[in-house]
Image: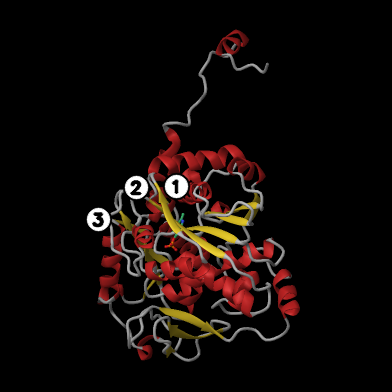
Amino acid sequence: MAVQTIAENTTSSVDLGPAAALSCRECGERFELGPLFACASCFGPLEVAYDLPAGSPEELRKRIEAGPNNIWRYAPLLPVPADVAEKPNINPGFTKLVKADNLARELGVTGGLYVKDDSGNPTHSFKDRVVAIAVEAARAFGFTTLSCSSTGNLAGAVGAAAARAGLRSCVFIPHDLEQGKVVMAAVYGGELVGIEGNYDDVNRFCSELIGDPLGEGWGFVNVNLRPYYGEGSKTLAYEICEQLGWKLPDQIVIPIASGSQLTKIDKGFQELIKLGLVEEKPYKIFGAQAEGCSPVSAAFKAGHDVVRPQKPNTIAKSLAIGNPADGPYVLDIARRTGGAVDDVNDEQVVDAIKLLARTEGIFGETAGGVTLGVTKKLIEAGVIDPTLTTVVLNTGDGLKTLDAVSATSQATATIKPSLDAFRAAGLASA
Ligand SMILES: *Cc1c(COP(=O)(O)O)cnc(C)c1O
């Protein structure tokens, strides 16, 4: 991993609001804000450290509630300048938290079941949250090209955000992604490069590019801007608690690709507790993977602390990261909170996509199928408690992964435009 020194790319005048420094998740060493992602001493991942806002929880809550209906209402808790909402950005967030009573009935959940539906973001996945934060870091550090290694959704989010921000974009994806993801990544007019390999090959390639003069002036949202990018996922935690009336859920089920989202949702809950915005109480975090790419689930079940990489083979391509960067931290969080990590096969993924659509009118992508599939499995296994408040994430839109359900979702009948033909089809109401 290439480590850039602070002097090369930062000045102390960087304004990212309450962000004070980067600190190493492993050894705690602090660094000036800059496009760094690994600790110069121990190579541990860097995280944003804050001067969190002073004042009473009531004041802060009021300030947030008076903010815009997007993630910028939480600007005082994010590494972004105070005037962020006035800049051209795609303004993601404040997506619906749907009380899923039909689904709850079907799954036997009595404690309240909610779907946080992030398909409602501007490019129809949760990735708009992380990219919006990374754009502010890219602007602050003077990058002119926005880039990423992507399993699909990130490429589209970067393309759109760069277009709005007036930055060039050049994004990298595995060459064999779903058509919907490819089109979404290309339509915003940036460069899109298909790499002959899987996501882990793409990511390795991007790490090489960062260390090479070819990648100079490039902000890779999930590599050299990763500490900032990750903070975007905290907004899911903030929104869920605010939408529950400033309360923590008892249980939450989160899909895992690199594991960044899951670890940052936990960080978001912890910050809300520290700030007094929610009452402290235990919560359990559950992680969901597809069987065909389940390195974290396998490690959890085996009781291991390290994650052994896998070669992905699943229809849940947005989660197909065989060597997840935040895997060990996900294991820590699942164990510390009394949660679990589990996986479901592709057939169960498809069944869960259709279950969510049939019961709640929400068409999720394969990642949503993975998350609901694992939720169902863990309820049946008695691991998720049906008497507690439970939130399930749907992180993307089913229109992007039509192939998963197209074989089994077709017209019930095709008929001539006549009442006789309709009668013969046997579909008239009784
Ligand atoms: C990227 C992605 C995730 C999870 O990503 P992490 O790398 O674990 O943060 C979940 N769902 C969808 C749809 C995604 O695109």
Image quarter hosting the C terminus: top right
Instruction: State which image quarter holds ligand 1.
Output: bottom left
Q: Earlier in the sequence, mark 3 or mark 2?
A: 3
Tell me which amino acid carries mark 1. Thr
Q: Residues within 10 Å of mark 1 (few under 14, many from 20)?
A: many
Q: Earlier in the sequence, mark 2 or mark 1?
A: 2
Q: Position of residue 88 (x, y in %)?
A: 56, 68
Task: Look at the numbered disc 3 and give the secondary structure of its residue.
Answer: loop
Above or below, comparing residue 343 to residue 90 in the picture: above
Q: CA distance from mark 3 to mark 2?
A: 15 Å
Q: Residues within 10 Å of mark 3 (few under 14, many from 20)?
A: few
Q: Name the residue that disc number 2 marks.
A: 314
Cβ atoms at labels 2 and 1 below 8 Å apart: yes
Q: Name the residue that disc number 3 marks.
A: 197
Of 55 and 202, the residue lying toward us: 55
Q: Residues within 10 Å of mark 2 (few under 14, many from 20)?
A: some
**Residue lying at the far top of the rendered structure:** 420
Q: Is mark 1 within 8 Å of ligand 1?
A: yes
Of 172 and 328, the residue lying toward us: 328
Tell me which amino acid carries mark 3. Gly
